[in-house]
Amino acid sequence: MRTSIATVSLSGSLTEKLTAAARAGFDGVEIFENDLLASPLSPEEIRARCADLGLSIDLYQPMRDIEAVPADEFSRNLRRARHKFELMRRLGADTVLVCSSVCPLAEDDDALAAWHLRQLAELAADFGIRVAYEALAWGRHVRTYDHAWRIVEAADHPALGTCLDSFHILARGSDPKGIEDIPGEKIFFLQLADAPQMAMDVLQWSRHYRCFPGQGGFDIAGFLGHVMRAGYRGPLSLEVFNDVFRQAEAGPTAVDAQRSLLALQEATGLATPPAPVVPTGIAFAELVTPDVEPVSALLSALGFGRTARHRSKPVDLWQQGEARILVNTGPAARRAGTSLAAVGLESPDPAAAARRAEALLAPVLPRRRALEDAPLEAVAAPDGTELFFCAAQPELPDWRSDFEDVDAEMPGRAPARGVTRVDHLALTQPWHQFDEAALFHRSVLGLSAQDSVDVADPYGLHRSRAVTNADGSVRIALSVGPAPTDDGARAQHIAFATEDVVAVARRFRAAGGRLLRVPANYYDDLAARYEFPDGELETYRELGILYDRDAGGAFRHCYTETVGRVFFELVQRDAGHRGYGAQNAPVRLAAQHAAGRPVR
């Protein structure tokens, strides 16, 4: 289906918004009145710019406080409307949005509202314009879509129809099934927006917290299904008021918006992009560093061995069990220090995974490689992390064939009760890309998202959401810090699974490694919350091991010092535990701040 986006959903000048929408693949736009008023371009020039970009102007919005008002007020409204219709004719827009009145003068009189809207529609028809009447969730008398439809039906004019907005309908808890009773040709326009579930004034909720479909808590796919069964055939248009989007760069936001509509159309059977290929494991995590010594020392103390080196690039493979870390000292290394630059995802069909990613607008990354190097498809996540699709089947080309074995002090096999694999990756996102990242990992990679959690930091709140495959062999915890910060402060960490975190932590310390110091107050509180066998809590206190428990079992974990932007976590997870230590995160964050390594 055709896709459209309201200019209010993007940041920047009107021309910047139009360019971003076109580049993201939208077919049309809704022009928000304030954007036009602030533009130095005339309506004719805006019309020409849209035509040059291949964009139709699907809606001009909004007209407010039109209906059910005193006669003299309505006369002024018709005068105002005539001016707007003349402007729309110059602009080349044929549909105008009229919101249900919030005017204090408006009367609770459906018959009067219908009569006024009919007169408005008659005037609009003279200009070749249609009027789409929408119920605002906070309207003075008309707040629900079925009430708005009854008024439109009573007005009975061919130039008058209704506009359905998912936020206004779902935020009020209205049952959208009744939409199917509205004739499709009378649904003049459809606006889509998701939102997190929040207990707050609906106007403030709407003005500040809307998001793109799939990023909130509404059933947008179910809502759209009702609209399509009613016979609607117009564009799918996004109208999203969001404080973050208004400050973020328009280009990436527009791509995120288009991706949300592609995923929504797939969910409702309106489009069939390549099917998702869910990754089956973490093949590797790649660290880029300007100084290999601190990273090498840390990995060695954790029990990893340098087992191989890339044939043509300055990249070493460190391995223990099934946990593999690439250490890259090439020219891409940042002066800010060590960072997690890439992740290899084991895939049952790397080529199909890449096709899916490209269809969902993930940037495909060019890769310079020697002729003998294994072919690897890679795309960029919203935060810039490179994601490589690595073959999980032995008969397909393997990325490890690019590496030559070296003499290592420790073989790639894990010692008894050592690190076995990567338990999860934790990536702190740029402050304006958290929702985008969650949607990206769900729609592009086919991972499932867990509920968002808020974690207290000494300087604000961290928001976190994990995405995972069905068996937990791929777990990625996405988080965002309390405020916009320099990208260089964004921390990342790799959590290694072990069957005995105490033994691994002791060996790590014996090898010269330093674990994060945890305040004694934490363990005093732990003693009050749980009962431990004799000596167990004292061991945790000695080593800085944190403890959590849920219905699925226990979670024991500890942290290394930070190198650059990266630190490591050792995890002992009972099979049924699905968490990531959120209960302990405030203590960990405070301890890292106290150690002089603030984490944003």
Image: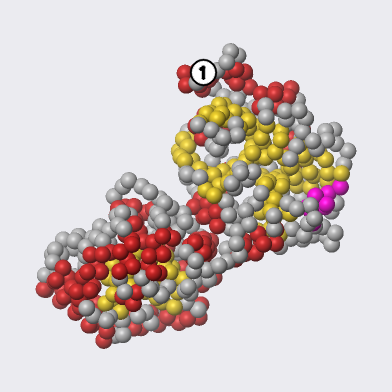
Is 203 situated above or below 418? below
Percent x, y for residue 201?
29, 50
Percent x, y for residue 373?
82, 57
Is 75 situated above or below 479? below
Q: How is the image coloured?
A: secondary structure
Give me the residue at 55% from left, 26% from top.
Answer: 547
Say whether residue 215 is left or right of residue 358: left
- Asked whether residue 291 appears in the rendered view, the answer is no
- Asked whether residue 112 appears in the rendered view, the answer is yes
Give me the residue at 62% from left, 41% from top.
Answer: 424
Percent x, y for residue 319?
77, 39
Give me the residue at 41% from left, 51% from top.
Answer: 217
* Residue assigned mark 1: 531
Give me the residue at 73% from left, 51% from top.
Answer: 392
In the rendered image, residue 398 lying in the magenta stretch gets the answer yes
Quadrant of the rendered image containing residue 559: top right
Quarter occupied by the C terminus: top right
In the rendered image, residue 35 lying in the magenta stretch gets the answer no
Residue type highlighted by circle 1: Glu
Q: Residues within 10 Å of mark 1 (few under 14, many from 20)?
A: few
Percent x, y for residue 31?
38, 71
Say whether residue 492 is left or right of residue 35: right
For the view shown, which residue lies furthest in the left direction?
71
Is 62 situated above or below 464? below
**What element does badge 1 sit on?**
loop
Say whether residue 85 is left or right of residue 264: left
User: Which segment is the magenta one?
Assistant: 397-404
